[in-house]
Amino acid sequence: MIYIFLGVIVLGAILASVRFLLGPTSSDRVVALDTLTTMTTAFMVLLGLLFNRYIYIDVALIYGVLGFIGVLTIARYLEGGL
Amino acid sequence: MEIIVVIATIILIIAAILTIHYKDLVAAVVASSVVSLIASIYFYILQAPDVALTEAAIGVGLTTIIFMITLRKTRRMEE
């Protein structure tokens, strides 16, 4: 069951990477980065479940918070308010 | 798990090449953030969660914020 979820997440990551490669503007790339960050968080939680280790969840937690702050900074720059 | 490593390697190499090639520096910062993200996944799969934690904190958070503050004070497009 976990492998099916991992396959779905990898497929979504590939599609987000295609949008990252083809994106005409910088805003498309920022949105693709945000999607990749979210999928990486879910990927890390699932791998922590698969490896049956408790500390792996902390990495996903830190990643979710800091990825959000990074994307927020880029969006703030593109909007002109930084 | 090997398939995930192969796909991550392909995305890592393409994003690293695009980081050098972009003239729009915001896109270059986003591409370098993708490189750091894939490197963090590498450390995670190799079962080093503390290194992955440091890579995530520095690569995604700190580097992006510092580059954006730098880009505010300079130009966006590279000549």
Image: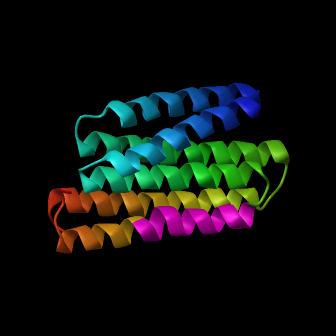
In the rendered image, the vertical position of residue A29 relative to residue A80, given as above or below = above
In the rendered image, the vertical position of residue A27 relative to residue A17, given as above or below = below
| Image position, residue A70 (x, y; %) | 40, 61
Q: Is residue B57 magenta?
A: yes
In the rendered image, the vertical position of residue A51 relative to residue B4, given as above or below = below
Quadrant assignment, res B69: bottom left
Q: Quadrant of the N terminus of chain B?
A: top right
Instruction: Write the start and end of the magenta stretch as one range.
Output: B49-63
* Frontmost residue, A75 versus B26: B26
| Image position, residue A34 (x, y; %) | 41, 47
Query: Would you say B54 lies left or right of B67 here?
Result: right
Q: Is residue B23 magenta?
A: no
Q: Residue furthest front?
A: B79
| Image position, residue A48 (x, y; %) | 76, 49
Identify the residue shown where x is 71% and y is 53%: B44
Identify the residue shown where x is 64% and y is 42%: A43
